[in-house]
Amino acid sequence: MPKKINVFFIGGGNIARIVREDLRNHINLCWYYDLKKTDFDCQYLERFEIPQEVEVVVECASVEAVKEFGIDILKSGKDFYIISSGAFADEEFRATFLAELKNSSSNVYIPSGAIGGIDIVRAVRNYVEKIVLTTRKPPKAFGIDGIQEPKTIFSGNAVEAIKAFPQNTNVSVTLSLAVGNFEKVMVNVVADPNVNENIHEINIFSSVGNYTVIHKNKPSPNPKTSYLAPLSLAAAIKRNIEKFKI
Ligand SMILES: NC(=O)c1ccc[n+]([C@@H]2O[C@H](COP(=O)([O-])OP(=O)(O)OC[C@H]3O[C@@H](n4cnc5c(N)ncnc54)[C@H](O)[C@@H]3O)[C@@H](O)[C@H]2O)c1
């Protein structure tokens, strides 16, 4: 029998539904808090309050929700999974959260989300020179018409990218947290008439090797969210339930 856990979800939308389904053999009781009641198959709580039986809190809502409830969750001492890693782009919030974490018995997990290669970044982080994230989308995704050649519409480090392209924030922040330095992550955004899907290419340059990871993600029912993101969150939770951890 797989181990079963009691879960409190923040957000009962697209990601929560996929995670719930993927963890169907691993969830005992579950609750969720959302701004509104949704068709999510866990018990709805109208106010944010963590039931005592909860073992794991899973954020699948928004950057704002992490900032609003993050500190209270650390005070509760429950383990905490965060998919809206973009919250840590805010330096002040990051400092407050990490200071609180020192006095908390919570463990905090940031799943790899819509990208892979985080295992490589973690392993080589002391040897990394730079990481280049290039996101290619069809020109119409940026409201651009009539170009024949790929056009770079943004180039800068993760700090600048977060300001210029907030839709990519979770990915740039997860990479930056993994390498432990926001300035080592460079971001290019390209409007490319030769592609018809969203492509993330990550190039990791380090003194122990260079690595390239290319993602051609399919969207989930919420087209803004890659299917990989909720599945990586469910995989992170399962990894901590299973005794044999890959
Ligand atoms: N790490 C990654 O790579 C990655 C990838 C995709 C999405 N995300 C994050 O996941 C989040 C959820 O994605 P989704 O596809 O499930 O979106 P969704 O819109 O389908 O569901 C989000 C739900 O959260 C609720 N919500 C939002 N803010 C809230 C708040 N402050 N308090 C309570 N409930 C709140 C909404 O009402 C909604 O029901 C996104 O906002 C994004 O930040 C991360």
Image (cartoon, rainbow, N blue to C red):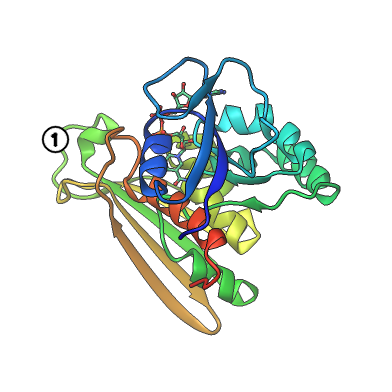
The residue at the point 61 percent across, 55 percent down is 177
Does residue 91 show up? yes
Q: Farthest residue toward the bottom? A: 208
* Rendering coords of residue 218 (x, y %): 24, 47
Circle 1 packing at 10 Å, graded few (<14), some (14-19), many (20+), is few
**Going by the image, does 172 lie left or right of 103?**
left
| Near-viewer residue (21 or 18) | 21
Helix, strand or loop for disc 1: loop
Q: Farthest residue toward the right? A: 103
* Rendering coords of residue 95 (x, y %): 77, 43
Q: Is residue 93 above or below residue 238?
A: above
Q: Is residue 205 above or below residue 223?
A: below
The residue at the point 66 percent across, 37 percent down is 53
Q: Disc 1 designates what residue?
A: 146
Q: Is residue 119 above or below residue 98?
A: below
* Rendering coords of residue 94 (x, y %): 71, 42
The residue at the point 51 percent across, 62 percent down is 239
The residue at the point 48 percent across, 15 percent down is 36
| Near-viewer residue (146 or 110) | 110
Question: Which quadrant of the view contains residue 159?
Answer: top right
* Rendering coords of residue 85 (x, y %): 56, 44
